[in-house]
Image: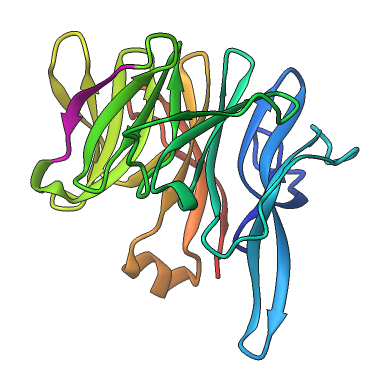
């Protein structure tokens, strides 16, 4: 797998295929919306860069551009999600300001005070959860347009792993484990001794991307793996391993 490829596979890890180049794939009404990338080759080799927002069928067909990124070196799209029929994304040109459009890329709106350069945008209900550069996790309510800090990662060093209902997940580098913080009880519990990011959920299970340790990389030559496990953190099962350049 190359960096910034959008792929799919069956739940048992078989049928792996590449659908296209892009980031932040989000499924909405049987279409995949994503930040479109293109491959750029120079004297240093090949890399990818964002060129706009696009959509495609679940099988990768019928790709269509929605929003073309401005031809401006200060502009770079990153992180995309969808809430209540609107596309939300970040553009580096606006210093972390959250932007939204309708599903056709029109009716652009700007939202101040969102600093999410180190994390993805995670959705639960009407709220978008994100992490700032100080490893503090907030939510932004898309209806009231208010934000609130919900928790922070100990020692300010970790990754935002995702949110499911009232549970916020994060990886703590100091403890080398992923934790679950419940918004109602305000209690924290260890989920698993791995660095995982939640990709999707189904019933009592979640599909995660696990970032392998240096020791595992030296042993396998792989950097990441996709796995399935229970929301309790039990029953972790590797589906596929790959190297991200």
The C terminus sits in image quarter: bottom right
Q: Give yes or no for residue 125 being in the magenta stretch.
A: no
Q: Outermost residue, bottom direction?
A: 43
Q: Outermost residue, right direction?
A: 62
Q: Which residues are magenta?
A: 146-153
> Which is more toward the observer, 50 or 101?
101
Tell me the residue at 72%/67% (across/down).
39
Residue 115 drawn at (x, y percent): 32, 41
Taking the image as shown, residue 81 lies to the left or right of residue 214, namely right
Quadrant in the rendering for residue 164: top left
Tell me the residue at 84%/36% (across/down).
59
Taking the image as shown, residue 87 lies to the left or right of residue 199, namely right
Secondary structure, magenta segment, majority class: strand
Residue 224 drawn at (x, y percent): 48, 57
Q: Is residue 1 visible?
A: no
Tell me the residue at 47%/52% (across/down).
92
Taking the image as shown, residue 240 lies to the left or right of residue 178, namely right
> Which is more toward the observer, 205 or 8?
8
The colour scheme used to paint the residues is rainbow
Residue 156 drawn at (x, y percent): 14, 47
Q: Outermost residue, left direction?
A: 155
Quadrant in the rendering for residue 88: top right
> Which is more toward the observer, 2 or 138?
138
> Which is more toward the observer, 94 or 78?
94
Tell me the residue at 68%/85% (across/down).
42
The N terminus sits in image quarter: bottom right
Taking the image as shown, residue 180 lies to the left or right of residue 223, namely left
Is residue 30 depicted above or below 47 in this figure? Answer: above
């Amino acid at each position: 797998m190359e960096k910034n490829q959008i792929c799919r596979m069956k739940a048992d890890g078989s049928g792996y295929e590449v659908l296209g180049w892009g980031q932040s794939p989000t499924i909405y009404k049987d279409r995949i919306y994503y930040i479109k990338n293109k491959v750029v080759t120079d004297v240093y080799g090949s890399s990818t860069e964002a060129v706009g927002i696009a959509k495609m069928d679940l099988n990768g067909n019928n790709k269509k551009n929605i929003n073309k990124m401005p031809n401006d070196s200060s502009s770079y799209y990153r992180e995309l999600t969808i809430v209540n029929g609107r596309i939300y994304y970040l553009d580096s040109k606006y210093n972390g300001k959250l932007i939204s459009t309708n599903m056709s890329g029109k009716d652009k709106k700007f939202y101040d005070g969102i600093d999410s350069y180190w994390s993805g945008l995670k959705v639960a209900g009407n709220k978008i959860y994100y992490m700032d550069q100080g490893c503090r996790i907030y939510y932004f309510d898309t209806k009231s347009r208010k934000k609130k800090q919900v928790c922070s990662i100990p020692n300010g060093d970790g990754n935002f792993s995702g949110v499911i209902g009232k549970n916020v997940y994060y990886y703590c580098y100091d403890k080398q484990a992923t934790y679950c913080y419940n918004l109602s009880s305000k209690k924290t519990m260890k989920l698993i001794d791995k660095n995982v990011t939640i990709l999707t959920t189904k019933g009592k299970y979640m599909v995660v991307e696990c970032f392998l340790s240096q020791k595992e990389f030296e042993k396998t030559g792989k950097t990441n793996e996709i796995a399935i496990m229970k929301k309790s953190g039990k029953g972790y099962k590797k589906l596929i391993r790959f190297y991200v350049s």
